[in-house]
Amino acid sequence: MKRIIPQDSFAAALYPGQPVTLSHPDHLYVVGRLHGLTPPRVENARVLELGCGAGGNILPMAATIPGGQFVGIDLSERKIEMAKVAAAASGLRNIDLLAGDAMVVLKDVDGLTFDYIVLHSLYSGVPVEVQTTLLPFCQRLLSDLGILYVSYNTYPGWYGRGLVRAFMLRAAAGIDHPEEQVSVARRALDDLIAAYAQADNSYAKLLEEEKTRIDNMDNGLLMHDLFEVENHPVYVDDFMVRAYEADLQFISEGNMAASREENFSPEARHQLSTITNTVQREQRIDFILNRSFRQTLLCRRGPAVQRHIDPGSLSEFHMASPLLPMGLDVGGAPGEAFFSTSDGGRIGITIPKAITALNHLALAWPDFLPALDLAERIGDSAIVAKLAIDLYPRNWLDLLPRQPQFTTTPGEFPMMTELARWQVGQGEMVTDLRHRNVNVTDEFTRQLIPLLDGQSDRQNLIVAASEFNRDPDMLVANCDPESELNAALFQLAERCLLVQ
């Protein structure tokens, strides 16, 4: 009888990887500062990514931090070759891409340290004996004030997810072609859900939740998430023990909202308030959320990590907020203004200067305003600091440690990064200047992007646009090349794709 084992479909499919917003040095710096640390400045940082794959995460970092030095390492020579092609085509000269075992590649380099180290989805995806060596290895490479980002699968959430993984692996056993393997596994999950007669019990809900998650994955990501050979989730308290033994300490989850008490139910807040040990508290949160994935930030043991945000650290940042003004509500308190959140909720604000500050941020969105400028506009730096303390950990406000790299106003010589101009020729996904993937499907815009090199002015772009191929089935009223160009540039700026 054939033994059921995962296939190395990750390597076969050459999963390209994606930008991981919470692993960008800009974000790591912000979270470190909010916890009382003094991380290295991002502008000239040294950054290492282990398991960089074909460069989907590290290449956009290098493109947005031209003064930094980047090193990406992956076991797959083929993926590294893909990353090198992309780097060369994008004109990136501040990155080294190396194939092989990082512990071998870097072992003979004396005195080499990095300010930011990224391990995304690598920690859970290596053999256990390698997993136990990763944190000590990274600690040796981390600069004194540096920050280590590690994402990994966690229990208890991965118990249910592992059940679905086991079923899909068995459904696709014996199939060699990765695309067919995934297609068969997807159909098998659909069949299992259709065959299960009980619709309202916990097992049915688990299957439906996993199906929804899997339906939202492209095939490459599904191969990586479910079909990789090695997959070793851990409890967060065990992970923290390993970190401590490696002389590392916990800073925060990359998503600070994941651990903030105000984001939980009243009973959960009560329980968490009684737990003073940080590790035990994080483990309780995982049980409350049934969490299956973490993005944890660590630093060397020594510097004191503050668990409350220091208002003094906020003045250096740039601020933006997606909250939209809704005005007053007859059911609200006197003078209370409401703002809608991106998830369909709303919050009420009664402090007049705080309302004014959020209105300024709403008018600027998606652009950022320097915190000092915002404080000057409303005449109260303490209110601006309190807004950041209250809203940033809820993902209702964004912070950047430096001037945004994008512009929301297309200029006479509009420009996109050389990487983004190359990416549009490879597929529909382009990485924006906020380190997120943006789907570009409009044919006019796809033809326009390669021309946005900062050398062609609007008039030359209009002339070029008049020669673009048009979709014969697309009917646009009263359109002409100039209006199409202006509309496309406005959308690119709104999506944070045009360089400042």
Image: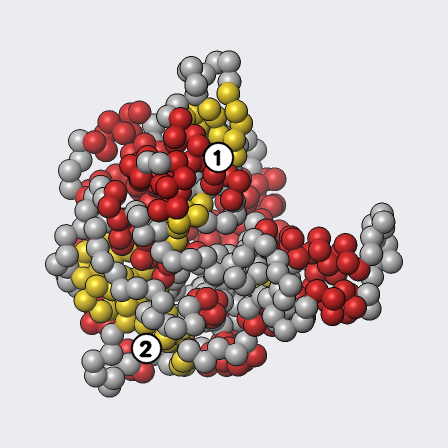
Task: Tell me if 315 is positioned left or right of 215 in this view.
Answer: left
Q: What residue is shown at x 22% (from left), y 58% (from top)?
A: 38
Relative depth, front residue between 463 and 57: 463
Numbered circle sitting on residue 465: none
Q: Residues within 10 Å of mark 2 (few under 14, many from 20)?
A: some
**Residue, disc 2:** 102
Q: Amino acid at mark 1?
A: Asn
Note whether residue 198 is visible.
no
Q: Earlier in the sequence, mark 1 or mark 2?
A: 2
Where residue 192 sits, quadrant-wise, is: top right
Choose top left, top right, bottom left or bottom right for residue 381: top left
**Which residue in the protein does label 1 denote?**
359
**Residue at 36% over, 75% down:** 69
What whole-number distance in Å separates the C-alpha atoms at marks 1 and 2?
48 Å
Q: In the image, residue 330 lies at what x, y percent?
A: 51, 13
CB atoms of marks 1 and 2 within 8 Å: no
State the image coordinates of residue 483 (x, y, percent, origin top left): 77, 54
Q: Is residue 248 left or right of residue 188?
A: left
